[in-house]
Image: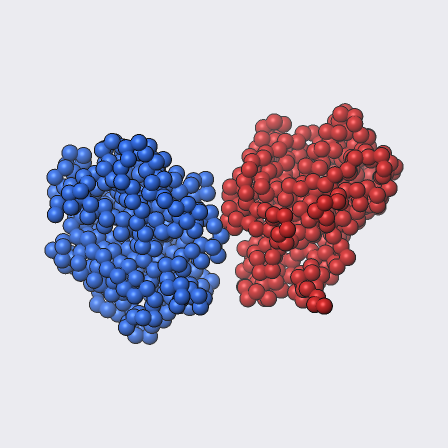
Chain colours: A red, B blue
Amino acid sequence: MSAGIVSYGAYIPRYRIDVGEIARVWGADGEARSKSLAVYSKSVPGPDEDTATIAIEAARNALRRVNIDPKDIGAVFVGSESHPYVVKPTASIVAEAIGATPYLTAADYEFACKAGTTAIQTCMAMVKSGMIKYGLAIGADTSQGAPGDPLEYTASAGGAAYIIGKEGVIARINHTVSYTTDTPDFWRREGQKYPSHGGRFTGEPAYFKHIINCTKHLMESVGTKPSDYNYAVFHQPNGKFPMRVAKILGFTKEQITTGLLTPYIGNTYSGAVPLGLAAVLDVAKPGDRIIAVSFGSGAGSDAFDITVEDEIENYPRHMGPSVMELVENYKMVDYAIYAKFRRKIHLGV
Amino acid sequence: MRRVAIIGVGTTKFGELWDKSLRDIGIEAGIKAIEDANISGSDIDAIYVGNMSAGNFINQEHVAALIADYAGLAKRHIPATRVESACASGGLALRHGFMAVASGIHDIVVVGGAEKMTDVSGADATATLIMAADQEWEAFVGMTFPGLYAMMAVRHMYEYGTTKEQLAMVAVKNHRNGALNPNAQFRREIDLDTALNAPMIAYPLGLYDCSPVTDGASAVVLAPLEMAKKYTDTPIEIIGSGQASESLALHDREDICTMKSTVFAAREAYKMAGIMPSDVDVAEVHDCFTINEIIATEDLGFFKKGEGGKAVEEGLTERDGEIPVNTSGGLKAKGHPVGATGIAQAVEIVYQLRGEAGKRQVDGAEIGLAHNVGGTGATAVVHIMRRVN
């Protein structure tokens, strides 16, 4: 029996900042910025939120919807590029918080924006092999953009958690493939506060090359074509890239709209595809086919071919907040508050 | 002095060549030129390479020997010389190759120009390029090239009534030409509104008034004219070569609406060629910023001082105009890999004089001119070429 999604949960911090507000501070044309990125606002983590708290919120929302003993979770993997500690795992904090300790394995993953989907793959393998009953895979980030850098308009926060297992599967993962090369399009070295990036180099040779090749590889392996899917979720560093990559691959705007959240919450990095997929699962019906393809700089893509099972009819989605509820429950802040929340203001002593 | 001809040309595509290194593009251009000239590596007596700042762009100096090595010439121990004069490095390399053949020291000389600029950030590229200005008097106080050329533009507008629209028309024309050049970085036309409403860089220069950051390489093969017919039916003779210098800092000049280096280099080249500016059928001029195409067409004697803007507006520099300027798309649309630019200009003139410029061909072009500038004009190099019948 193949592995699949037993439950999922999402979390998005409540604060938002408008792209125009960021542009105002830097003397840029906010309307033009917003249009060129196809992003209107981005989520901002509160002063007491970090990747660990976001991961825990998402994991708890996943557990609320399913009757699973946390002790049956044999593995917790948290994918992020903003783990609160360089040395000291986020995954152990999450495992403790949800009551899954101590008889489990746990680790943090980092692969820019795709570490969360890679965590899903690891859980699938462990479940399929019988090593564990359930695995918890989380993608969560409080991503960093240097003040004034183009990244600042989109770098946001959020995450989603997936419980992977064999029993009570609401969405079967039929197949997964990956595509990885050594492509330095975006990086952050030890001790560096903000990431560096290669400007336009992050596009064609990075995002597009990896997503296109990985998606084609998955569809060739499974024998599907774009029209076989009800929904498609692509990594979404901004609103433009996923729309363009969908068009190049032959997917329609209708297929990607449900899972496209970046225009309202920005780029949640490791949280992006997990959140987009969660938004699709919020509304999916039995028999729906979903393709989800992540991208992480550095660079690689993971692609998933998913079929929604009948079990989703019995699954109490309402026990946890839907992604759209989280998107729509927001409070706008200005740049000053944003700068304080993101610790861009250093208090003098 | 022997007469010198270009017997082969080659160029890479210009643009953001992320999957190619400096040595890759240098060799690609060189091999294309060698194949075009029907020579083999063993025929080459020397190579010259125009390169502005490989040390800052890719942390590699000593690039002439490097390219000779990777071209398979290391065991032949031929002289390999790098020539640097900022954005005029390519034009100056061509002049040194020309002098070496003319003097009788070498027979077959390959002259290349190459620059790999996209390995660094835009900010680092800007910081490297400003090294071509006066560090102590200009760069240290925050000056950038768009800023320096903007001052020239503002003064030109004040003195002669040149308009922002006329500057934009240079960009529109060069994009129209670039759209027809398969090797150009920007192969798309733009309209006047797009150019006028683009983000401001340094008043009055908007985004489309500025040439881009580009990777690219070009090469030519030189031979004594008497040997040229052995290799090609269409040798293009270099009939004039001129070079001049000027104060490095802009503020040390009496008049910033003219580049005396261009005036003097052109005078020398015209004299050597025995022609008048009105004899030129097609010209590639250094439009690093749109204002400089206007200033250059005046300083080269195509138009009276102050009338360059009007000339663009009247279409005199269009492909079917009185003096077609920058049929390649110029630095604006073809791209500006700084060390390669001077050679790329010569390559375009050779295509035009051979009648091989495709859709951008100027009918019956017999005499062509290439004008290459370093910095804000502290160096200018002018070459005049003619078809040999």
Q: How many labels, in total?
A: 0
Provide residue B131's location: percent of width, then percent of height. Answer: 39, 58
Does residue B199 sit above or below A235 in this rendering? below
Closest to the observer, B270 or A209 = B270
Residue A284's spot in the image, x, y percent? 73, 40
Report the residue at 22% width, 33% height from top: B43
Can residue B310 be seen here? The reply is no
- Residue depicted at 30% across the width and 57% down the height: B373
The location of residue B307, given as percent across then percent down, is: 25, 68
Q: Residue at x 66, y 65 (%)?
A: A335
Residue found 38% across the figure and 40% down from its top: B23
Q: Quadrant of the N terminus of chain A?
A: top right
Residue B132 drawn at (x, y percent): 37, 59
Q: Residue B161 vs residue B199: left or right? A: left
Picture quadrant where residue A48 is located: bottom right
Q: Choose top left, top right, bottom left or bottom right for residue B26.
A: top left
Left/right placement of residue B72 relative to residue A324 reads left
Horizontally, is A214 left or right of B213 in the view? right
Is residue B133 shown to the viewer in this render?
A: yes
Looking at the image, which residue sits at the far bottom?
B158
